[in-house]
Image (spheres, rainbow, N blue to C red):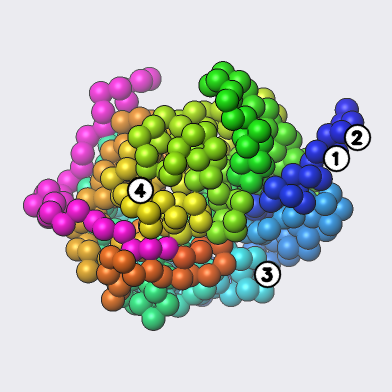
Amino acid sequence: MINLSEVLETNKMVSEQTLDVRTITIGISLLDCADSSLQKTCDNIYAKLMRIAKDLVKTGDEIGRDFGVPVVNKRISVTPVAIVGSACCKKPADFVKIAKTLDRAAKRLGVNFIGGYSAIVSKNMTPADEMLIRSIPAAMKATERICSSVNVGSTKTGINMDAVKLMGEIIREAAELTKKNDSLGCAKIVVLCNAPDDNPFMAGAFHGVSEGDAVINVGVSGPGVVNAVLKNCRGMDFGELCETIKKTAFKITRVGQLVAQEASKRLGIPFGIIDLSLAPTPAVGDSVADILKDIGLEHPGAPGTTAALALLNDNVKKGGVMASSYVGGLSGAFIPVSEDQGMIDAVEAGALTLEKLEAMTCVCSVGLDMIVIPGDTPATSISGIIADEAAIGMVNQKTTAVRVIPAIGKKIGDSVCFGGLLGYGPVMPVNRFSCADMINRGGRIPAPIHSFKN
């Protein structure tokens, strides 16, 4: 039973500590929309999205008002489009037509993003996979609300280095095509290893082929709540600190569980998972970096940062799994740069480098996220960054990702502004030494020895 003190505590989390339900995401299978005709496929996709998601935004707003908890984003994820379009798309431009169809549906429905303009190529690429990947820059230029992801590796399969090389080139091309908007297109492209099927957070969301026809996944975010609680924990030892984080994560997840079950009931769509991720925003007081500072760091990047982040991530997960039987997605702590004012401050203070961020990704939820790099960074260097992150994910059996923005015309010391949730970011230096000969080898890095479990 929920008592009065818990109600008052939750109200305080919302009013003073920026607790929110970051997203209600409907995952929708488009497998039954595929047709040998491109136009018919597009028509089927549009009709199905409009039918299943027609009440998503209205319902999310109503739940937010009824429960007093802001539901910030309403989103859709779809079956990887490389699969859906494989029978009808003969060239990259055909996939762009599907992207425009998805974008048109997103605008009509009022959702802020549709994820799933994706390809799963962790072992090799089909012709359709490669065509979709090559279409990504044009699709990002031609649309506003489409998010793209490519899974290039897994613990079971190894790393597809041909796809890694190609994605370095694709990110550079997308940066060029959207340079008038500070290369914004790259902010909606993520390269993953060990991508989960049920992630509600963009840009890596897609509706996995193991899912049903439609599902409700909810992402809850509460870095401001954890931050506020830890301000009262100075002087505690690590055992007490961990217990405090776990209990707070439990309470946050319960809010998400309540919202998810209500959304499922009102929309008539099965509930999938709760993703409890401390995903920051540019708002002051809604920062994962500030949590790390409350643990005892002068700035993220200081010695001890990776240990502090490991502690935070683990106890968020432990608290979450006690609150819901269906915790999934990514769940843990995100460490984007442009979306977290504390991370931006750390970069500008000289405390946080790309190399330290890479070390931190070994223990966070995802990886190198929303990092702005010089516009003249070679495609092979971007591929090298992707390969490093994929290797961390592959060996450690975890999800890792890269979302970097080579801001065309910008150099170290400059900054870019995307606005809204994507925030702004300083341009960070990239190691100037080349990895081109390695990237150009091609082929596949084999799976690690501990992948052979059966």
Label 4 sits on a secondary structure element that is: loop
Residue 377 x %, y %: 22, 64
Query: Spatial distance from mark 4 to mark 3, Cα to Cα?
Result: 37 Å
Amino acid type, residue under disc 1 in the picture: Leu
In front: 235, or 341?
A: 235
Mark in the foreground, 4 or 3: 4
Q: Which residue is mark 1?
A: 8
Task: Find the magenta span and give its range.
Answer: 425-454
Quick one: label 1, few (<14), some, or many (20+) residues within 10 Å? few
Q: Is residue 203 left or right of residue 248?
A: left
Residue 270 x %, y %: 72, 43
Q: Residue furthest bottom?
A: 180
Q: Residue furthest right?
A: 4
Q: Residue at x 49, y 34 (%)?
A: 296
Q: Residue at x 66, y 41 (%)?
A: 228
Label 3 sits on a secondary structure element that is: loop
Q: Which residue is mark 4?
A: 352
Q: Which residue is mark 2?
A: 4
Mark in the foreground, 3 or 1: 1
Q: Residue at x 84, y 57 (%)?
A: 65
- Quarter of the image with the N terminus is top right
Residue 371 x %, y %: 38, 57
